[in-house]
Image (cartoon, rainbow, N blue to C red):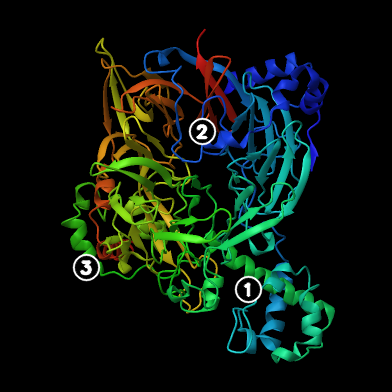
């Protein structure tokens, strides 16, 4: 662990001059508000809507939006192993963001680096990092070798680190911690060697464990009836790798859990395999499960149900309702009552071929013929899914839920036919994919408009704003602004690569900025002045 | 934009009166992203397998996956924490009397070999991209031939004595399965199949060639002479794309798995 020298020293040297930038920590009350002058948590606020009430950049002037600055990552002596997947936090004029083993602070007005922190790794899969959580002046991020690291936001110096999972067991960690009062909620990942998933709450001052919720039951616990034996559930997976959402009134934290393990060989874990591939509601003070809804009972396709559970205060049949909507990796769009988890709507948002419909609880019924086979079965969507971790968005003004949807095919092979398979137990071979931006009516699941691309690729993050704008990327490397009501394109710019994180926005000194990451570069856009 | 990015950073760095190293692009993970620990020496693994099989396999299974009386060692915490026998060595030498495991008086070298074997078993489970795919040729070749010439209309573009002659000599069955479903260009293809495009300008001038890019704002192509042409999209521009793989994409939604296996059973006969 060390601090990069040059820019960090500069920041120290100029410290007094810039002290207003650093002296203000994050007032936790900001987390309860819609994002305006700050973007204090992964999704901007607890709702996961990724909708900003800012409208200085709007549909009448967006054609004059232009580059304000860009920041190209410099890892010092380290190497960069992933594109920018983290959504930067913006607090008091500073952007904070991460990559595996790396963290940066840059001036939100200019893109100038203030500090760079590097973690000395002990291994783990370096696939990406989703960013920081913040509490007062303290930042928190997770590392591929499963440490929760707390930094001082002022200068990037390390305050402490604590281990949250064992890299020798093939855990690796990518999520952005979510801060709820004095709880730092952290998750883990890792499907390689059939380890059990869990979510933890850590103390913001010391990093000590407050509670742990296991995503699979232990012997004799509720849910054990959905597994054949204790060994299967203790090796049952269910990772917690995408930050969840929170309803302060209900005091419930909503999380989508990952797929069961072994990933593709289900013969050693017959049953529904709770609470993998589920949307769960937990009490953030105790980690106790309030309710669950299982999106893919007995998944064998690697379809983590980790996609953001988006909180919508909407109307169903004329009645105001507290809702939760998710575009699941398995291709279904789900709407639940978030007070109790009761299903309101389950409707595919792409054409799928693995489900025989839904049961009385609205949970999809898998077709056994489409589980992985030694000679291969052709499944849509592909392993990467119809959606994935990149953030969807809900615009309360249009009433539409937006997702970059992937129509794709994989061949799924079962390679381990033993009674007790290990590891993945199977392989996939990607065949074909096409990406399309879709606008879904949350009340009916109907697709109001679609913008199709003539290329495939992974899903891409989305932001909507009260300026009647939708910001996202296409698979060709364009950053595009759409009219969220009609799908008409209003503006675009070609970036260094495809958009690789969720775009975010904030306002400083009367100027609105939109920040987006593509590959190794962070771009800040604003209106011409 | 790439050059612009470098220029911007250079300017910023100059203003800051620092002399940082040139910005480094993110390096692709070298080697295998899934394996982050040292890969054991294959000779030690081979020796370890023999020693393990002779001494440990009866209880722990010959592949260390566990048996009736001995636990799985592939996913064992102790074995995963082990480095060159430092954790499993004492257990082997002392046994676990309370669990019915006797002591094995093996020399240090053999314990290290067993450790190498167990690490290789763990890494074999971890490295999913190296899993062997089993037999994929399970279909009925006559039905596959009928589908090829009938419902699939594959014979509209392809012939077993023409472009597909000897196809089964060129590709193994697993490769052939994914390639016939959608033969998108893959690294190393000698003649990758790509879309062709004609772009007609308002003036009536037409450019034709291999499609290089098509998005909402730009169309780009390479003509037969290898010259690159790029155009901003505009309603006056007429773009005509011919995608030779369109029929393959359309069939993906129509095949049953039986159709797919039958076609493969037919294609593997084309040697």
Between the C-alphas of marks 2 and 3, the distance is 66 Å
Q: Residue at x 36, y 30 (%)?
A: B211
Q: Residue at x 57, y 33 (%)?
A: A30
Check the image and report above or below for A127 versus A419: above
- Judged by depth in the image, the label closer to the viewer, 2 or 3, is 2
**Contact check, label 1 and label 2, Cβ < 8 Å:** no
Q: Residue at x 79, y 16 (%)?
A: B17
Query: What residue does disc 3 label?
Result: B142
Q: Secondary structure at mark 2?
A: loop
**How would you rate the neighbour count of disc 1 (Cα within 10 Å): few for under 14, some for 14-19, many for 20 or more?**
many
Query: What residue does disc 2 label?
Result: A33
Q: Position of residue A333 (x, y in %)?
A: 33, 49
Q: Residue at x 34, y 24 (%)?
A: A483
Depth check: A1 or A108 in front? A108
Residue furthest top as drawn: A529
**Circle 3 marks a residue in which chain?**
B
- Judged by depth in the image, the label closer to the viewer, 1 or 2, is 2
Q: Quadrant of residue A395?
A: top left
Depth check: A24 or A529 in front? A24
Depth check: A383 or A296 in front? A296
Q: How many marks?
A: 3
**How would you rate the neighbour count of disc 2 (Cα within 10 Å): few for under 14, some for 14-19, many for 20 or more?**
some
Q: Secondary structure at mark 3?
A: helix
Q: Position of residue A74 (x, y in %)?
A: 69, 31
Can residue B165 be seen here? The reply is no
Disc 1 and disc 2 on one polypeptide chain: no
Query: What residue does disc 1 label?
Result: B74
């Amino acid at each position: 662990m060390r601090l990069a020298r040059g820019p960090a020293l500069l920041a120290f040297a100029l410290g007094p001059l810039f002290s207003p930038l650093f002296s203000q920590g994050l007032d936790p009350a900001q987390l309860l508000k819609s994002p305006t002058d700050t973007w204090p948590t992964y999704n901007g606020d607890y709702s996961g809507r990724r909708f900003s009430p800012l409208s200085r950049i709007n549909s009448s002037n967006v054609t004059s939006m232009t580059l304000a600055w860009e920041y190209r990552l410099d890892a010092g002596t380290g190497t960069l192993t992933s594109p920018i997947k983290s959504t930067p936090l913006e607090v008091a004029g500073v952007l904070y963001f991460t990559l595996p083993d790396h963290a940066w602070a840059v001036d939100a007005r200019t893109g100038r680096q203030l500090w760079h922190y590097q973690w000395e790794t002990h291994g783990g899969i370096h696939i990406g990092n989703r960013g920081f959580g913040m509490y007062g002046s303290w930042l928190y991020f997770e590392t591929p070798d499963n440490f929760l690291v707390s930094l001082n936001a002022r200068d990037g110096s390390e305050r402490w680190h604590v281990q949250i999972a064992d890299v020798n067991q093939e855990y690796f960690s990518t999520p952005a911690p979510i801060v709820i009062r004095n709880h730092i909620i952290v998750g883990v990942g890792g499907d390689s060697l059939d380890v059990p998933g869990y979510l933890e709450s850590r103390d913001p001052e010391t990093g000590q464990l407050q509670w742990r919720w296991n995503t699979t039951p232990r012997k004799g616990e509720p849910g054990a009836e959905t597994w054949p034996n204790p060994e299967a559930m203790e090796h049952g997976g269910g990772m917690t790798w995408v930050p969840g959402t929170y309803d302060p009134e209900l005091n419930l934290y909503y999380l989508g859990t990952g797929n069961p393990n072994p990933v593709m060989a289900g013969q050693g874990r017959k049953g529904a395999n709770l609470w993998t591939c589920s949307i769960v509601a937990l009490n953030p003070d105790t980690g106790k499960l309030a309710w669950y809804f299982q999106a893919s009972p007995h998944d064998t396709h690697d379809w983590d149900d980790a996609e953001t559970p988006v909180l919508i205060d909407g109307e169903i049949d004329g009645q105001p309702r507290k809702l939760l909507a998710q575009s699941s990796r398995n291709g279904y769009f789900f709407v639940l009552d978030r007070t109790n988890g009761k299903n309101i709507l389950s409707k595919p948002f792409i054409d799928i071929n693995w489900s025989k419909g839904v049961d009385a609880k609205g949970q999809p019924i898998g077709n056994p013929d489409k589980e992985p086979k030694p000679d291969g079965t052709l499944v849509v969507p592909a392993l990467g899914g119809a959606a994935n971790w990149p953030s969807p968005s809900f615009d309360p003004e249009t009433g539409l839920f937006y997702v970059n949807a992937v129509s794709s095919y994989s061949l799924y092979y079962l390679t381990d036919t033993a009674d007790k398979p290990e590891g993945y137990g199977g392989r996939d071979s990607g065949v074909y994919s096409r990406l399309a931006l879709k606008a879904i009516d949350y009340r009916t699941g109907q697709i109001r408009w679609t913008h199709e691309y003539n290329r495939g690729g992974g899903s891409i993050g989305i932001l909507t704003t009260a300026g009647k704008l939708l910001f996202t990327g296409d698979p060709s490397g364009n950053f595009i602004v759409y009219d969220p009501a009609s799908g008409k394109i209003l503006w675009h710019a070609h970036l260094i690569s495809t958009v690789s994180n969720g775009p975010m926005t904030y306002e400083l000194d009367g100027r609105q900025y939109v920040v987006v990451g593509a590959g190794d570069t962070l771009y800040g856009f604003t209106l011409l002045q | 934009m790439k050059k612009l990015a470098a220029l911007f950073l250079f300017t910023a760095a100059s203003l800051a009166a620092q002399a940082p190293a040139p910005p480094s692009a993110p390096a692709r993970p070298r080697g295998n992203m899934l394996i982050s620990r040292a890969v054991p020496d294959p000779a030690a693994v081979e020796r370890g397998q023999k020693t393990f099989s002779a001494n440990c396999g009866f209880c722990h299974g010959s592949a260390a996956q566990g048996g009736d009386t001995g636990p799985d060692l592939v996913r064992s915490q102790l074995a995963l924490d082990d480095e060159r026998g430092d954790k499993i060595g004492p257990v082997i030498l002392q046994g676990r009397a309370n669990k019915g495991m006797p002591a094995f008086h093996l020399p240090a070298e053999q314990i290290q070999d067993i450790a190498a074997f167990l690490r290789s078993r763990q890494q074999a489970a971890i490295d999913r991209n190296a899993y062997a795919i089993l037999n994929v040729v399970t279909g009925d070749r006559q039905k596959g031939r009928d589908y090829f010439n009938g419902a699939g209309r594959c014979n509209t573009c392809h012939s077993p004595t023409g472009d597909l002659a000897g196809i089964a000599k060129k590709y193994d069955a697993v490769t052939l399965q994914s390639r016939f479903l959608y033969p998108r260009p893959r690294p190393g293809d000698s003649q990758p199949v790509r879309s062709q495009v004609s772009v007609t300008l308002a003036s009536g001038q037409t450019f034709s060639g291999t499609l290089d890019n098509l998005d909402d704002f730009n169309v780009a192509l390479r003509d037969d002479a290898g010259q690159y042409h790029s155009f901003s999209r505009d309603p006056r521009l007429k773009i005509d794309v011919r995608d030779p793989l369109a029929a393959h994409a359309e069939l993906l939604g129509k095949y049953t798995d039986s159709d797919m296996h039958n076609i493969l059973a037919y294609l593997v006969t084309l040697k």
